[in-house]
Amino acid sequence: MANLRNLKKEIDYRLEEVVFDCDMAICFQPSKEKEIFEVMQEAVGVRNDLFAKAMNPAEPHNPSLVRKHYAALRAEMDDVFGKLFEKLSKINEKK
């Protein structure tokens, strides 16, 4: 990771992708709007949690621990947003 700014941009990018996919799903399946909107709200909550964690590392004066913190945060980001995409896919599979 190059810097905190890039990490925050990556978090926002992932959020935008989830929201865009949710908007498209609502356009094609308006009957599932409530379920899809809940996924969007959950994605915004995840974004806010990740931002809070990014801005507050446990030991800000220990570079080694800060790197580990951000590596764990990146892995968590991949996992959480992946689960949101899976959740949206499952909603879209239902008829």
Image (cartoon, grey):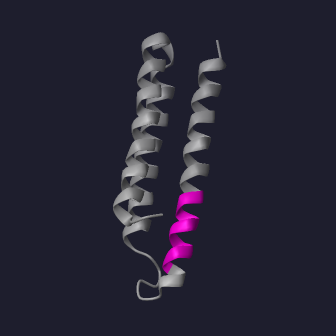
Residue positioned 63% across, 34% down in the render: 86
Q: Quadrant of residue 57?
A: bottom left
Is 86 placed left or right of 25 in the picture? right
Of the pair 71 and 15, the residue shown nearer to us:
71
Q: In this rendering, would 79 be left or right of 52?
A: right
Whether residue 76 is situated above or below residue 29 in the rendered picture: below
**Residue 4: x and y, percent?**
38, 65
| Front-lying residue, 4 or 95 | 4
Q: Residue at x 47, y 26 (%)?
A: 21
Labels in figure, total: 0
Res. 76 image quadrant: bottom right
**Which residue is at the far bottom?**
61
Q: Which quadrant does the C terminus fall into? A: top right
Does residue 44 sit above or below 59 in this rendering? above
In percent of width and height, residue 88 lies at 57, 29
Main SS of the magenta segment? helix
Residue 20, relative to residue 49: is it above or below?
above
The image position of residue 64, as x and y in percent, is 53, 83
Q: Position of residue 26 (x, y in %)?
A: 44, 18
**Residue at 50% across, 12% down:** 29
Q: Is residue 94 magenta?
A: no
Q: Is residue 37 above or below residue 11?
A: above
Magenta region, residue range: 66-75
